[in-house]
Image: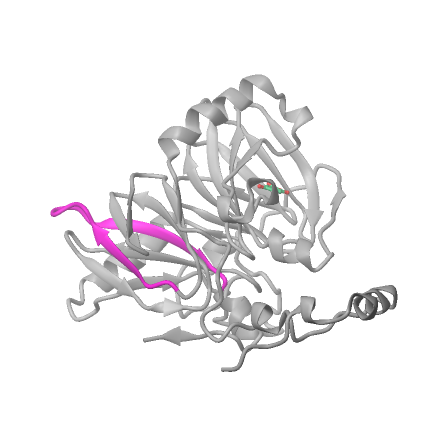
Amino acid sequence: MNDLGRLEDLPLDYRQDLTAQNLVPLWPSLRGVMPPHLPPRKTQATHWSYRAIKPLLLRAGELTPIEKAERRVLVLANPGHGLDKMQASSAIYLGMQLLLPGEWAPSHRHTPNAVRMVVEGEGAWTTVEGEKCLMSRGDLILTPTGQWHEHGHDGQDPVIWLDVLDLPLVYYMEMSYHVDGQRQAVGGRQGHQQYARGGLAPTPVFGRSDRRYPMLRYPWVDAKAALQAMAADASIDCLQITYVNPETGEDAENILGFYALMLRPGQSLQLPARSPACVFHQIEGRAEVQMQQQAFVLESADTCCAPGYTPVTLRNLSGDQPAFLFMADESPLHRKLGLYEVRA
Ligand code: GTQ
């Protein structure tokens, strides 16, 4: 490949004339924006320890009342992007949120899509468009774009959950904003019960539901049972499920994808290099996540991320207990854009 001309090769007066007209010559920057190899990624392999986060989050509970925070969150920021950018990858935002007994995080809606993965504590709930979703360890709760949501807590102990949003992408698109709302009236709908059995969809007389988000809460007991049922078949190596919209079978949300994965005792699983960045969060057990000559040990509720195009090896560190991981990635976005790639 030939070397392209540099900016310094051009006469100063010509460069100034271009600048005055808001024009830029492409050739000095062409290789930078389109290198002849995999692009350098700002997203760094990063590990966040729950043991380290929890006391800092509880301290935030003492320092900042919920009224002064609206959402009391410590953001899991990737140093490769700069901590102030508050992003785990180019499209993924991660935060750990604390709600204390009796607190209420008021109703709002916003353009970014969110999900919550419940980490610790009982008695909290998120109401989404009038549907009250109880929060238990490992439950996944959707708050998709534009849907009213508020969080409350009737239990005794602090509740902590992991927020996953596509905020960096929506912000980059200059579309990120929110609207404040009123406390929601709670209706009777419970999508997780109506869609509790895979392959069987509720069918009112007028036909199947066309709700864009028919299921908002994915209880961990059901996800875990699905993985354990798969594990009974010894020929299945990759024990992984995708959180889908039960009416369409498509990804539960538009931009980010959500998955749960089980590792048998002692199992190692190689994930190929794929274009999307990926986040791993330990629900139960201990696992090692290896990538780019690094190995992170995920204790319960630890989180780490892998940049795109990075092969990852997962290993269950227990020889007699299964390990369960929650994963989030940018696959739906890449697929919709026609950019999704797997590299051997
Ligand atoms: O709970 O609605 O971590 O609006 C960031 C923004 C959580 C939320 C976050 C939010 C929320």
Name the residue nearer the viewer: 327 or 288.
Answer: 288
How many numbered discs, if any? 0
Task: Name which residue lies at 71% across and 37% down.
Answer: 183
> In the image, what residue occupies the spot 59% across and 69% down?
33
Question: Which quadrant is home to the C terminus?
Answer: bottom left
Quadrant in the picture for residue 52: top left
Query: From what the image shows, is residue 52 above or below residue 177?
Result: above
Report the front residue among 37 and 234.
Answer: 37
Question: Which x, y percent locates residue 87?
Answer: 55, 48
- The answer to which quarter of the image holds residue 75 is top right
For ligand 1, which image quadrant applies?
top right
Taking the image as shown, residue 44 lies to the left or right of residue 101, namely left
Q: Is residue 158 magenta?
A: no
Considering depth in this image, is 239 or 75 the residue closer to the camera?
75
| Residues in magenta, as a range | 310-330
Query: Can residue 21 be seen by looking at this rendering?
Result: yes
Asked if residue 311 is among those painted magenta in the image, a careful observer would answer yes
* 53, above or below 209, in the image: above
